[in-house]
Image (spheres, grey):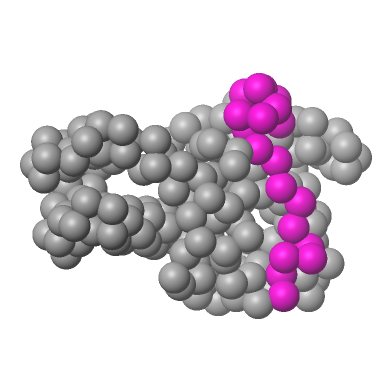
Amino acid sequence: MDASEYIKDKQLVIFELDDVLFPEKDYLLQVYYLFSRFIEYTEQKNAQPILEFMRNEYENIGTENLFQKTANQFGIDTKYEYNFNLLHQNARLPLKLLLYKNMLEFMQALVVDRKKIVIVTTGNPEQQLNKIKQTEWNGLEQYLTVYFVEELGQPKAEIFQNILSDNNLLASQALVVGANKFDEQQSKSINLQYIVSLEIYK
């Protein structure tokens, strides 16, 4: 659907970050690249097979126990798990994270129409902030208000409700854009309209 159809009666739009504004894998694969290079430098182990292994495990199975699997496969000392986890939080990425084209255009349309843009993101707050800092926002960063779920220690539905209250808005005046069933459930529990990010095009 055309983006204007979603926002014509809205004053505020709430977004999740990962797999909504950009692919989470664009961040994680760069973290794995940096970790494999770190191991190559410190342990003289070839980075390329390590990176390929991590990429394949992530794409086929996910992130669970990825360090342990990689350490077992390549004989990497478990002391490096600290470095692996730290890179997730503070990695300086070789390449900036790029917004999905439809999300970039949608957010630009929101700015033109003077709608408020809010990000409510789940995950390690330091890691999520690191992603935000290394995203190419094309000037949109000055229009963003960001809430970190773990930092606030509240359910998303409660955070959504507080955002509405702080902006003196009804649920009918806001929209949530997400990419998972949990966000959909949290939104609908307080009567917020919810759409999947892939449904938006301009």
Q: Name the one closer to the observer, 50 or 78.
A: 78
- Indicate yes or no whether the magenta region holds residue 150: yes
Q: Position of residue 142 (x, y in %)?
A: 79, 65
Residue 68 occupies quadrant: top left
Instruction: Tell me: 45 left or right of 122.
Output: left
- Indicate yes or no whether the magenta region holds residue 156: yes
Q: Quadrant of the C terminus?
A: bottom right
Range shown magenta: 139-159
**Relative to 173, is 22 above or below?**
below
Count of labels in the image: 0
Identify the residue shown where x is 72% and y is 75%: 139
Q: Position of residue 82 (x, y in %)?
A: 39, 35
**Relative to 152, is 136 above or below?**
below
Residue 32 occupies quadrant: bottom left
Q: Position of residue 116 (x, y in %)?
A: 79, 57
Q: Position of residue 83 (x, y in %)?
A: 39, 42
Regarding residue 64, the answer to whether it shows in the image is: no
Q: Name the one closer to the observer, 161 or 81.
A: 81
Identify the residue shown where x is 44% and y is 48%: 87
**Relative to 141, is 153 above or below?**
above
**Relative to 149, is 201 above or below?**
below
Instruction: Tell me: 195 left or right of 19.
Output: right
Identify the residue shown where x is 53% and y is 50%: 90
Regarding residue 83, the answer to whether it shows in the image is: yes
Identify the residue shown where x is 18% and y is 41%: 76
Instruction: Tell me: 129 left or right of 50.
Output: right
Q: Name the one closer to the observer, 87 or 98.
A: 87
